[in-house]
């Protein structure tokens, strides 16, 4: 069945053949807590004959989401701890998150803000709240970068995005505006000339981080959307969440990272999944993640290497968590591990080493 509009209910997923009938009741139970949305572009990627399809696993509800572990939390990365007012998260000195909207074109089943987003979530900033948020940014000269996130900021109309950029344009200390989005992948037709133009403002460098987790997401339409952004001078970054059953394989990760680079998207972060409620079935151990990152070294170009990071629970920020390749060996020397697991002394003790 061809899907021609976004599906927002479990029953709609079942009708489209994206959810087996015997999982409908469980999916409806999940939907009572967490939002559902699957765009036509995403529905077209799902293999209905594969019960373990990595695209379906990202977007189709699973009863496992109702199993909450003791270590999981509603605000796993501590946004609220660092929110001085509505719409702003100021965790690091030189940058802020501006959360203008809390809805998305799709809802990932592993979302770390799943308690805040969706039709029943925190909604869109009112004009008054947006004005206060921009005033906060203007009043803090240490803020060099503004990151629009949410929710997905690219669900906003071109007019509203242009309005936000126009408000940021006169603030002299803001030099970079970054957008975090799934739209080029899940709704590529939205990336038209009007929207692309709305993302730019005089005197501001525009960056856009594209979230994709599996190489099949980088369709011809998604690559064309990325090209429209890149051709306009917007710098593209790739963000990926390491997910069991989706991309927990070195070959899959390598294909995804190469696909990013081919589309002029520089791999940026590979996120260890956060402790969001009901997401334990997606999480791997840090050791497993480190092994996958090690497997990428030397096998794909340096252009394709993301930084493996963990957002420390409680609002303490990101930390790189790839396994170390350097350790002290004494007397000012170090042991360096190469990409094949070999170990080498640095500086060498002789020309032969």
Image: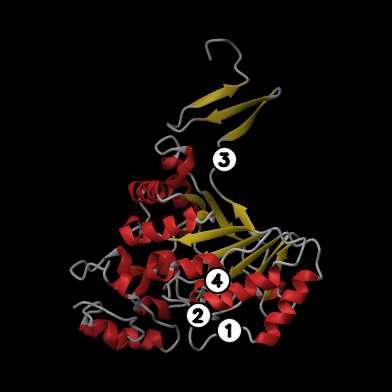
Whether residue 89 is visible, yes or no, is no
Q: Residues within 10 Å of mark 4 (few under 14, many from 20)?
A: few
Q: Nearer the viewer, mark 3 or mark 4?
A: 3
At 51% across and 78% down in the image, what residue appears? 157
Spatial CA distance of label 1 from label 2 is: 8 Å
Whether residue 132 is visible, yes or no, is yes
Q: State the mark number for residue 324.
A: 3
Q: Residues within 10 Å of mark 2 (few under 14, many from 20)?
A: many
- Residue 324, relative to residue 121: is it above or below? above
Q: State the mark number for residue 103.
A: 2
Q: Label 3: state its secondary structure.
A: loop
At 22% across and 67% down in the image, what residue appears? 47
Residue under pointer 4: 71
- Residue 304, relative to residue 92: is it above or below? above
User: x, y (%) of residue 48?
Assistant: 21, 71
User: x, y (%) of residue 153?
Assistant: 54, 73
| Display coloring | secondary structure
Q: Nearer the viewer, mark 2 or mark 4?
A: 2
Q: Nearer the viewer, mark 1 or mark 3?
A: 1
Spatial CA distance of label 1 from label 3 is: 42 Å
**Label 2 with label 4: CB-CB less than 8 Å:** no
Task: Point out the tag, 2 or 4, that comes first from the N-terminus.
Answer: 4
Q: State the mark number for residue 18.
A: none
Q: How many marks?
A: 4
Task: Point out the tag, 2 or 3, that comes first from the N-terminus.
Answer: 2
**Label 1 with label 2: CB-CB less than 8 Å:** yes
Q: State the mark number for residue 124.
A: 1
At 50% across and 54% down in the image, what residue appears? 286
Write down the quadrant of residue 295 in the picture: top left
């Amino acid at each position: 069945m061809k899907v021609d509009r976004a599906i927002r209910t479990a029953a709609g997923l079942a009708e489209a053949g994206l959810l087996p009938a015997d999982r409908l009741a469980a999916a409806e139970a999940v939907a009572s807590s967490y939002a559902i949305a699957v765009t036509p572009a995403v529905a077209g990627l799902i293999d209905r004959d594969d019960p373990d399809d990595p695209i379906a696993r990202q977007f189709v509800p699973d009863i496992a989401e109702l199993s909450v572990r003791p270590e999981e939390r509603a605000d796993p990365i501590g946004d609220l701890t660092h929110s001085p007012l509505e719409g702003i998260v100021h965790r690091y000195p030189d940058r802020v998150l501006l959360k203008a909207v809390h809805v998305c074109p799709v809802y990932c089943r592993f979302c770390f803000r799943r308690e805040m987003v969706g039709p029943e979530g925190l909604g869109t900033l009112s004009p008054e709240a947006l004005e206060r948020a921009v005033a906060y940014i203007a009043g803090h000269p240490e803020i060099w970068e503004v990151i629009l996130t949410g929710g997905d900021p690219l669900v906003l109309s071109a007019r509203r995005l242009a309005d936000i950029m126009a408000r940021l344009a006169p603030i002299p200390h803001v030099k970079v505006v970054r957008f975090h989005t799934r739209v080029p992948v899940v709704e590529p037709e939205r990336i038209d000339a009007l929207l692309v133009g709305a993302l730019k403002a005089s005197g501001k460098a525009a960056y856009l981080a594209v979230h994709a987790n599996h190489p099949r997401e980088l369709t011809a339409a998604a690559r064309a959307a990325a090209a429209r952004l890149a051709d306009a001078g917007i710098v593209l970054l790739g963000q990926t969440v390491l997910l069991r059953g989706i991309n927990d394989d070195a070959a899959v990760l390598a294909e995804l990272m190469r696909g990013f680079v081919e589309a002029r998207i520089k791999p940026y972060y590979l996120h260890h999944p956060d402790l969001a409620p009901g997401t334990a079935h997606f999480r791997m151990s840090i050791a497993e993640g480190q092994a996958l990152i090690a497997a990428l070294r030397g096998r794909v170009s340096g252009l394709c290497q993301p930084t493996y990071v963990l957002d420390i629970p409680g609002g303490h920020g990101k930390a790189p968590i790839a396994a170390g390749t350097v350790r002290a060996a004494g007397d000012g020397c170090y042991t360096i591990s190469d990409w094949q697991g070999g170990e080498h002394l640095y500086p060498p003790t002789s020309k032969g080493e």
